[in-house]
Image (cartoon, rainbow, N blue to C red):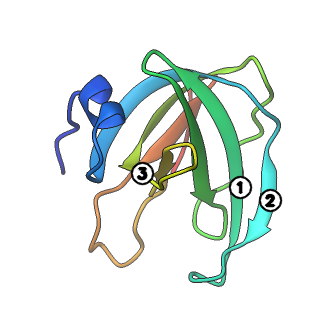
């Protein structure tokens, strides 16, 4: 398993980083069809100790996480930076091909991976 890097350093950086952090859900989930993955995704914003991020989860692989604004979550995934947008945390699910580290969303003591 990949080791998570210091979250504040990853948030402030520019390179992709594997992270594990707690946050408060800041928006209702949005759903979209991924142009590259050709799979359904769930996205929602969170407020963390380092700042605001967008969490994107492939719900064709992992079950939908029924979060609502104000909920507390734990997130493990890959943080990537897209200039001009919020940092994004993706790979918040298991990898069926076992080529990438597994991530998750933990909500109300339930693991969504």
- What label does residue 31 carry, if any? 2
Task: Name which of mark 2 and mark 1 comes first in the sequence.
Answer: 2
Other residues around mark 1 within 10 Å, as few (<14) / some (14–19) / many (≥20) = many
Residue 111 in the image: state x and y as whole percent. 53, 38
Other residues around mark 3 within 10 Å, as few (<14) / some (14–19) / many (≥20) = some
- What label does residue 42 carry, if any? 1
Residue 39 in the image: state x and y as whole percent. 66, 77
- 76 horizontally vs 113: left or right: left
> Which element carries disc 2, helix, strand or loop?
strand
Name the image quarter holding residue 29: top right
- Give the residue displayed 62% in from the left and 30% down from the top: 46
Residue 88 in the image: state x and y as whole percent. 51, 48
> Which element carries disc 1, helix, strand or loop?
strand
C-alpha gap between disc 2 and disc 3: 21 Å
- What label does residue 81 carry, if any? 3
Q: Are marks 2 and 1 in contact (CB under 8 Å)?
A: yes
- 71 horizontally vs 48: left or right: right
């Amino acid at each position: 398993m990949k080791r998570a890097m210091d979250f504040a350093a990853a948030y402030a950086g520019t390179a992709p980083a594997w992270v594990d952090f707690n946050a408060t859900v800041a928006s209702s989930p949005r759903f979209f069809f991924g142009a590259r993955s050709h799979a359904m995704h769930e996205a929602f914003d969170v407020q963390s100790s380092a700042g605001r991020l967008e969490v994107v989860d492939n719900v064709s692989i992992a079950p939908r996480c029924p979060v609502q604004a104000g909920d507390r979550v734990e997130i493990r995934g890959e943080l990537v930076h897209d200039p001009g947008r919020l940092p994004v945390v993706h790979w918040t699910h298991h990898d069926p091909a076992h080529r990438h580290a597994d991530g998750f969303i933990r909500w109300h003591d339930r693991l969504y991976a």
